[in-house]
Image (cartoon, helix red, strand yellow):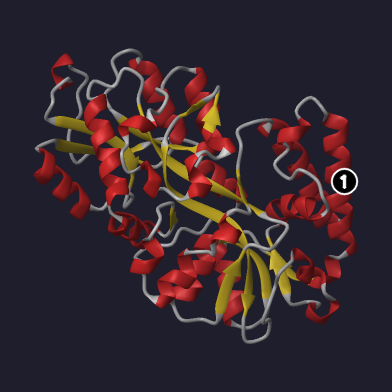
Amino acid sequence: MSEIVSINRRTALKLLGAGGAVLAAPYIIRPRPAWADNGVLNITTYDKFLPQEFIDKFQKDTGIEVRIRLTDDQGKQYNLLTAEGANPSTDIVTVAGHRYSQFISSKLLQPLDTGKIANWKNLNTAYQDAPWARVDGNLWGLPILAGYEGLARNVDYVKEAPSWEIMFDPQFKGQTSYIVSDFMTIVMQYLGHDGDFVSYAGKADVAQKATNEARDFLIKNKDMVRKYYDAGSEVQQMFINEDIYLAHSWSGPAAKLIIDGHPIQLSVPKEGTFGFCYTLNVVNNAPNAENAYKLLDAILANPEVGAAMTRQSGYSSTMNGVGDLLNEREKLASTLPQEEVDRIIFFSSVNRDMKNEMIDRATAEVKAA
């Protein structure tokens, strides 16, 4: 795996969900009607998401010229599509699931016709018809890569961790760490509440009570924590120094430790966790929509494509069979048992303003206590 992205809640929502800045343009894309050409496909995506070997083979097999425009920010991508209106300069864009409502309400995407994707069955069942992926009765994109929050542990000292409760076990006092804002929502789930706030839309009083309970729980157990951290490099160093044995961690930083040979394992406890997912979406009025579907189908045709995506990006593949193509270290770093995959709740775009406001305030109160 060539790159692991270190993520916390804010950077995750900015990286995944914020937008689509143009970083580089291997091919120049100009909004001209001549694009409606059977031999062209224009894609806006992130660096290292689509393996060059796959693109080369697809072009050779189909005769379709693939033009890639790189992006690193979804907000700018949204702005570009909005400005282009009915004459988009791209056929496929890469959207994070929790940003769906913004793109869909602005009519920038077209519903996904899975009937045109013969290999849809090769997508992991956790993603085929996930609640976050279905809006207004339709699916809107092909999930390709996912990241999640997990329970990381040093297996030399912590053999099993079936529940988030272990983060509050007195035997590990002073040997745990977490990002307060992210772990706050995990604790809400642990306490039986809705950490993604979807069910709290229009119920601010209920949401505030649940948030306060999680806040008070973290304050009560503050002596369990060695250090609150913000950057993935911080939790990596604490594990390397054996300052901590347990931590809430995004999959990226933990995967890097595992790949480097440290005795770390990442899991999803029984109470569940949260994650994000990148999807490839066909643009509304895409001039080469049929070619777009050919590419989506080709991605799912061979798990080797998913394995290459995982190695390059550092995120987990959504495709069946990828785990069989990874070495043992790569499997530990980027795959989960199916029952743990099924425990991941992917961030929703519903009620995000309320969530951010309440979690940010509670986070400050925990740190100040």
Give the residue drawn at x 75%, y 34%. Answer: 199
In the image, residue 267 sits, relative to residue 147, either above or below, namely below
Residue 280 in view, yes or no: yes
- Left or right of 216: which side holds 320? left
Q: Nearer the viewer, residue 138 or 35?
A: 138
Could you tell me which residue is drawn at 87 percent across and 35 percent down? 206
Mark 1 packing: few (<14 Cα in 10 Å), some, or many (20+)?
Answer: some
Foreground residue among 165 and 213: 165
Farthest residue toward the top?
86
Seen at 53% across and 31% down, the residue is: 134
Q: Residue 152 location, x and y as percent?
A: 62, 70
Q: Quadrant of the C terminus?
A: bottom right
Q: Which secondary structure, mark 1?
A: helix
Asked whether, in this view, residue 41 is left or right of residue 4, the answer is left
Query: Residue 328: x and y, percent?
Result: 42, 77
Which quadrant would residue 236 be assigned to in this image? bottom right
Residue at point 42%, 60% (across, down)? 314
Residue 203 placed where, x, y %? 83, 28
Residue that badge 1 annotates: 212
Residue type at mark 1? Asn
Residue 83's spot in the image, x, y percent? 37, 17
The residue at the far bottom in this view is 156
Left or right: where 129 falls relative to 88 = right
Quadrant position of residue 62: top left
Q: How many marks?
A: 1
Residue 69, can we see it? no
Looking at the rendered image, the quarter that the N terminus falls into is bottom left
Q: Nearer the viewer, residue 75 or 134?
A: 134
Quadrant housing residue 190: bottom right
